Image (cartoon, rainbow, N blue to C red):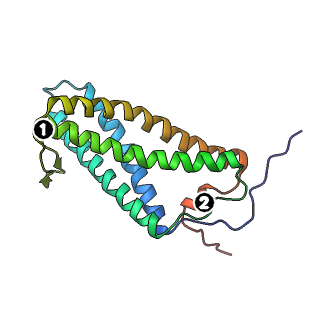
């Protein structure tokens, strides 16, 4: 009978608390923007909710873009902790590659969305506080941006699923404390 691996007791190299907050805020925004997108595209155009949902979708997208830019800047100044020694070489490569690809898609999605809107002569209002600078109307450019935006959504779904499944694998199978790297340090009550 196979035994269940025990959780390692070695010290966990954690991300800086700012990196942790940026990660979880980004995750919450991604989890918010997806259902908004799904609902806004199935509602009839004359629905009174469409305009509000589109505004929130665009605003959250712009926020994600800004957060990712800040995360890249922050990461340059505060490198990620070393990967745990428990990772196989292929796991380390997969982890690094999936993180780079997540950053790429979370930059491409908002940029393509902005170009799609702005080049279609649709303003991008940030939570109705201000409007992003418009672009000259350019239907061919908007069509390309639309295709990029639509196809990149599938990359987002795949990469987020891989990220979550990879975390679950480390929690359930490897039990190596990888998730703890992105969580605040727990203080023992003992």
- Which of 148/131 is in front? 148
User: Residue 52 in the image: x percent, y percent?
Assistant: 18, 40
- SS at mark 2 in the image: helix
Where 30 sits versus 18, above or below? above
Instruction: Name the residue at 85% across, 45% down.
Output: 3
Residue at 37 percent across and 55 percent down: it is: 68
Q: Is residue 176 left or right of residue 139?
A: right
- Which one is nearer the viewer's eye here, 15 or 105? 105
Corner quadrant of residue 82? bottom right
Q: Is residue 26 left or right of residue 11?
A: left
Left or right of 161, for residue 145? left
- Residue that badge 2 annotates: 180
Q: How far apart are the two marked residues, 2 and 1, measured between alpha carbons?
A: 43 Å
Q: Nearer the viewer, mark 2 or mark 1?
A: 1
Label 1 element class: loop
Q: Is residue 45 visible?
A: yes
- Against 188, residue 140 (above or below) is above
**Toward which corner of the image does residue 190 lie, by quadrant?**
bottom right
> Can you give x and y, in whole percent of width and height, for residue 2 in the image?
86, 41
Badge 1 crowding class, 10 Å Cα cut-off, few under 14, some 14 to 19, many 20 or more, is some
Determine the residue positioned at 18% across, 29% down. Answer: 140
Q: Which residue is mark 1?
A: 122
Instruction: From this view, report whether residue 84 is shown above or below residue 61.
Output: below
**Does label 2 or label 1 sit earlier along the sequence?**
1
Residue 180 place in picture, x, y as percent: 60, 60
Tell me the quarter of the image containing the N terminus: top right
Give 33 or 63, whichever is nearer the viewer: 63
Give the quarter of the image for residue 38: top left
**Residue 111 percent location from the top left of the image:** 28, 44
Res. 47 mark: none
Q: Is residue 167 visible?
A: no
Q: Residues within 10 Å of mark 2 (few under 14, many from 20)?
A: some
């Amino acid at each position: 009978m196979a035994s269940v691996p025990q959780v390692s007791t070695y010290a966990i190299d954690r991300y800086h608390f700012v990196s942790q907050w940026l990660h979880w805020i980004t995750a919450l925004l991604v989890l918010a923007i997806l259902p908004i997108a799904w609902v806004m595209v199935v509602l009839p155009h004359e629905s009174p909710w469409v305009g509000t949902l589109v505004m929130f979708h665009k605003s959250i997208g712009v926020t994600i873009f800004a957060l990712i830019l800040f995360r890249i800047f922050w990461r340059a100044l505060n490198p990620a902790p070393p990967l745990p020694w428990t990772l196989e070489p292929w796991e380390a490569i997969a982890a690094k590659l999936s993180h780079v690809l997540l950053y790429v898609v979370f930059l491409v999605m908002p940029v393509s969305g902005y170009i799609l809107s702005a080049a279609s002569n649709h303003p991008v209002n940030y939570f109705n506080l201000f409007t992003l600078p418009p672009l000259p109307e350019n239907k061919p450019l908007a069509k390309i941006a639309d295709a990029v935006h639509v196809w990149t959504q599938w990359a987002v779904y795949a990469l987020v699923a891989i990220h979550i499944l990879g975390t679950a694998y480390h929690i359930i199978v490897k039990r190596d404390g990888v998730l703890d790297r992105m969580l605040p340090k727990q203080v023992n009550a003992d």
